[in-house]
Image (tube, rainbow, N blue to C red):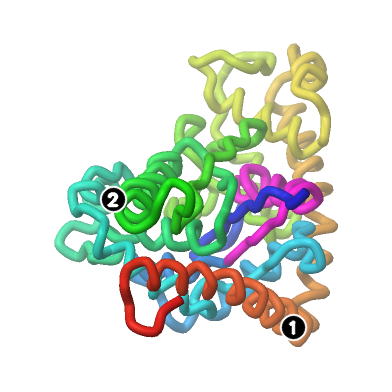
Amino acid sequence: MARARVLSGVQPTGALHLGNWLGAIRNWVNLQESHDTFFCVVDLHAITVPHDPARLAADTRSTAALYLACGIDPAKATVFVQSQVAAHSELCWLLNCVTPLNWLERMIQFKEKALKQGDNVSVGLLDYPVLMAADILLYDADLVPVGEDQKQHLELARDIAQQRINSRFGTEEAPILKVPEPMILKEGARVMSLTDGRSKMSKSDPNEGSRINLLDPPELITKKIKRAKTDPLMGLEFGNPERPETDNLLGLYALLSGQAREVVASECAEMGWGRFKPLLAEAAVAALQPLQERYAELAADPAELDRVLANGRQRASAVAEATLARTKAALGFLGAG
C-alpha cells in the first residue's frame, strides 16, 4: 500500500530557530519514517518582500543543510530547492488565472504584512498563497503539516484545486488535482518569543533576543535565556493565561529535555527563575549540539549538499512535471498531456 505523501517547506530568510525546529522540522524527521515526504526550501517565497540578493543563495544552502543536520535523510525524503523546479512558477501562473482576486484580498497574513510595507507592497506578497497552492498541488500531497497561522492558506489551496480546477476542468471520477488535507501537529507547534509569550517566535522579529537560532553558540543561547522575559511569581506552571512566558519557557524545557510536560511541571512547581533558567539553557545547548556538529560537517563538504539537492531536484521534477502536464492538458494547451 502506497504511503501518504506529505509536503512542507521553510523560507530561507533569516536563520532557522527553535520554533522552526520544534514546530516543524523535528516532526518532519518522524514523518519520513511513515510517509512519502517532500521537503523544499521555498526560496521563491523569500522574494515577496525586499531581500538581499547577495544572501539569498547562501541562506538557501544553509537552510537545506540545516534540514539534513536536523535529521532529514535524503535516502528517505526528497529534499530540494523550490526555484530549481520550474513547474512551481508555471503552475502558479495557471492557478492565478482561475483564482478570484477577492480570495487573496481576504488573506489575514497579507493584510498584516501589507500594513507594515505600506506603498511598497508587491503583487508577489498578495499572490504568494497561490504559489503556495502550486507548491502543494504539484506533488499530489495527501497531507500538509500546518500551524494555525497557515490553515487559511491551505484552505485556499483546497478551494483552488476543487472549485476552480477539478469542478471546471475535470470530473468526479478523474480529478485533475489532488485535494490535500491538513495535518495539525499540536505538540511544540507554537513556540513563542522569548521577549513576548503571546507572540510566535519569528525570524522577522527585529529583536535577536526574541529567538534562539539553531546555530547560536552555547554562550549566546545562555545569554538569550538569561534575558528572556519572565514574571515575578515563584514556581512554574502550565496553562495559566496570565503567565504566557512561564507556559512557553516551561514548554520549551519539556521539549528540549525530552521529558513529559507532567514531569517538568512537577520538577519546577516550586522553582524560582534563578534555578530554572540555567536548566533551560543547559537543555537547549545539549539538544542543539549534535545538530550543530552535523551542520559543520556539511558546511565543510559543499559537494555533498550539492549532490543531495541535485538528486532531490530530479525526483521532485519528475512528479511536478507530470502534474503540470496533466493540468495544462485539462486547460486546453496545445501539445500538453
Q: Which residue is drawn at 51% across and 31% down?
A: 197
Q: Which residue is drawn at 53% across and 41% down?
A: 181
Residue at the disc numbered 1: 307
Residue 32: within the magenta? yes
Asked whether the residues under the numbered discs 1 and 2 touch, taking CB atoms below 8 Å apart as contact, a structural biologist would say no
Residue 222 visible within the image: no
Q: In the image, 234: left or right of 118?
A: right
Closer to us: 118 or 187: 187
Whole-percent x and y of residue 22? Answer: 67, 44
Whole-percent x and y of residue 331? Answer: 32, 68
Residue at the disc numbered 2: 110
The CA distance from mark 1 to mark 2 is 36 Å
Whole-percent x and y of residue 147? Answer: 52, 39
In the image, what residue type sits under mark 1? Arg
> What secondary structure predominates along the stretch shown in magenta?
helix
Q: Residue at x 76, y 53 (%)?
A: 32
| Mark 1 element type | helix
In the image, what residue type sits under mark 2? Phe
Q: In the image, 239: left or right of 251?
A: left
Which mark sits nearer the N-terminus, 1 or 2?
Answer: 2
